[in-house]
Image (cartoon, helix red, strand yellow):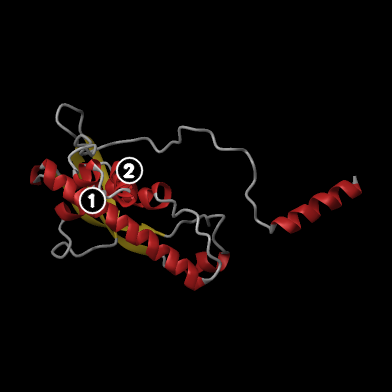
Amino acid sequence: MPPECHCCDQLVEWPRPAQRPTWMSEEDHAALPESITLRELKYKVGPRGFRVREVTLVTTLLDTETYPASDLADLYRARWEVETNLRHLKITLGMDLLHCKSVEGVLKEMWMFALVYNLVRLVMLEAARCRGVEPNRVSFIDAARWLVRAVIDPDAEYAVSLTSLIVNPSRESRIEPRVIKRRMKEFPLMKKPRDQLRQDLLRGKLVA
C-alpha cells in the first residue's frame, strides 16, 4: 500500500451490543466486557483508471510498530488469494466431503489432500519459472490436470513440458460479488441418520 494512500490509523472503543444476538445465550452475552479496544485503519485503494474506494479495516492487532498499517493493508488485500486457495482445497480437490469415520482416518485423509495440494503448488512454481511469471498466476486447475496426466503417462510429451499451462492475467485489487451462479436445490439438510428418516416417513404414512 503506498504511504500516500494511508488515511487513518487510530484506536477506538466498541461497546458491547445492547441487543443480544439470537445465536448467543444470555449468559455468554452478560459475560462480555462492557467495551473492547480495537484498531481502526482507513485507507483508499483502486487500480489505475478506476475510481478509488475507501477501505475500513478493524483489527485487534494494536501494536503499530509490530504490525504497521501498510503490512495489515497488504495482508487484507491478499485475502482474495487466501479464500481462493481454501476453495481449491475444498472444491477443486474435493476436501469439502471427508469419508472416514474415525479421527485417525480423517487426519490421514486431510494429510493426503495437503500432500496433493502441495504437489500441485510445486507444479505451478516450476511452470511459473519456465514462463517468467508469478506462481499465483498459473492456473491451479490446469496444474492439477497436468499432474494427473503426468502420473498416468510420465513419458508423454506434455508430462515433460510445463510451458503449456494456462497463465491467468494479473488481477490485483480484484473485486467480486459474494453470490452464487447456480440456484441451490431446495431440500433440507440431512440432520438425522438415513434409517431414522425412513422410519419417520413410514410413521407419517401410517398416521396419515
Looking at this view, name the residue that lies furthest to the right.
207
Q: Quadrant of residue 141?
A: top left
Q: Amino acid at mark 1?
A: Val
| Image height of 201 relative to 169, above or below | below
- Residue 180: x and y, percent? 45, 36
Q: Secondary structure at mark 2?
A: helix
Which residue appears at 87% of the width and 46% of the height?
205
Q: Quadrant of residue 24?
A: bottom right
Q: Secondary structure at mark 1?
A: helix
Q: Amino acid at mark 2?
A: Ile
Report the disc number at residue 141: 2
Which residue appears at 49% of the width and 56% of the height?
18
| Image height of 188 relative to 62, above or below | above
Quarter holding the C terminus is top right
Looking at this view, name the residue that lies furthest to the top.
49
Name the residue that disc number 1 marks: 123
Judging depth in this view, the residue of 25 and 181 nearest the camera is 181
Q: In the image, is 25 to the left or to the right of 130?
A: right
* Label 2 Cα neighbours within 10 Å, binned few <14 / some 14-19 / many ≥20: some
Report the disc number at residue 165: none
Q: Is residue 164 visible?
A: yes
